[in-house]
Image (tube, helix red, strand yellow):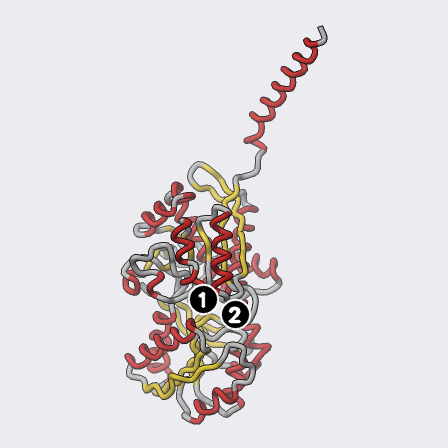
Amino acid sequence: MSRFPSIRAGLLGLASALALSLAAPADAANPVLKIGFVGVTSGPAAAWGTSNVRSMQTLAEWWNSQGGVKIGDKTYDIDVVTFDDQKDPKRAIAGMEKMAQEGIHYVVGPNVDDGAAAVRPVAEKAGIIYFPYAFPKELYAKPASNAVLGMVASYQSGPAIYKYLKEKKGVKTVAFVAANESDPLSQRDSGVAAAKALGLDVVADKDTYQNDTRDFTPVLTPIVKLKPDLLVLSGVAPANAPLLIRSARELGFTGLISTETAQDAKVLEEGAGDLANGFISVGGASTPEIRSKAMEEFIERYTKKFGEYNDESNTKVYALQYIVDTLKADPKAIDNVDEFKKTIDAFSAPNPYLKDSSASLHYVGDTSFGQKRQLAVPLVVNEYQDGKFKTLFVANVD
């Protein structure tokens, strides 16, 4: 007799469990879609990766607060998983391996050439599409297919900047200086080639410095004596830019100074002050004249969340947007990067960050790489003035 109460209790328990399981979907949180970041968030180049991470976190938080992102018949919350590679290729490999172990198929970064090249075997083996901010063409040209360039490359922005300065500022002679590392040296070489192609006289193209240099006087003294119209700081890290600018100006250099890398206005103001006025750099892919209300809200949310805003995030906001919108176009790509690759060629979606209603998100790169492996983001070139960037011109690349 004692067995019957226990059977009855067991049946009641089973009924309760079934009721809970049937009710669970209505009450359950959204499934989570993890998107990774592997890049530099510490050291002299920290601003590059920090703007990536903060952009991704701001956008993910915004979407999640609105109920998540609908991809196919499911709605996901976005979780940004980050790894600081400290600008070290070995750590970048470890970071990409971590992403693979967590089953992450889409990763933003790395931020420099060495790191982006180092993680390629891991990404290709693990089935990861990654979005570097690095410029070696072999990462984006066949047979490579897993890397998508997240910004305008120096060999695309350099010619545009030099042409503008030649036509608008009368620049005739140019000198280059670069850190003795593969990334800036590669940018220097492409810059030299672009300058010569435009008919500019390159008066210096072999001067280098170690990345931990803090006194640039010995480096810049022979260049300043040449009196070039333009001094190009090839691939300069944000922390080194104000030191180089200050040294050049204190040595009496009166010409123009530029770079093809994005910079941080706050770092320039703190490190060089008024001496940085007139410094020309690649800016974020938005200006007050072209940005939409959504872009303005993104900036507001970013600033509220982190207490400041980095102009480069005008570009860095695009990577996560492209990933999610491409997945929306082909939900099977959630866990199949081959589907993502198939979608790239014909992909098009409204660009939420530009006023122009005809502007679209799409992939480019046919001209530079022979295949679409680059995000179509506007090329914005800025001039620093009194603590802020002002827009010199806006262009597009194919």
Mark on residue 45?
2
Q: In the structure shown, which secondary structural element does the residue marked by tag 1 occupy?
A: loop
Residue underneath mark 1: 112
Q: What count of labels does the image hold?
A: 2
Q: In the structure shown, which secondary structural element does the residue marked by tag 2 occupy?
A: loop
Q: Is residue 66 left or right of residue 233?
A: right
- Residue 23 occupies which quadrant of the picture? top right
Give 280 or 150, whichever is nearer the viewer.
150
Give 44 or 22, whichever is nearer the viewer.
44
Q: Earlier in the sequence, mark 1 or mark 2?
A: 2
Residue in the picture at 39% in, 87% down: 229
- Residue 224 in sight in this render: yes
Circles 1 and 2: CB atoms closer than 8 Å:
yes
Residue in the picture at 39% in, 64% down: 378
Q: Is residue 56 above or below residue 202?
A: above
Image quadrant holding the C terminus, namely bottom left
- Residue 286 in sight in this render: no
Q: Amino acid at mark 2?
A: Ala
Q: Is residue 383 above or below residue 6?
A: below
Q: Position of residue 106 (x, y in %)?
A: 44, 51
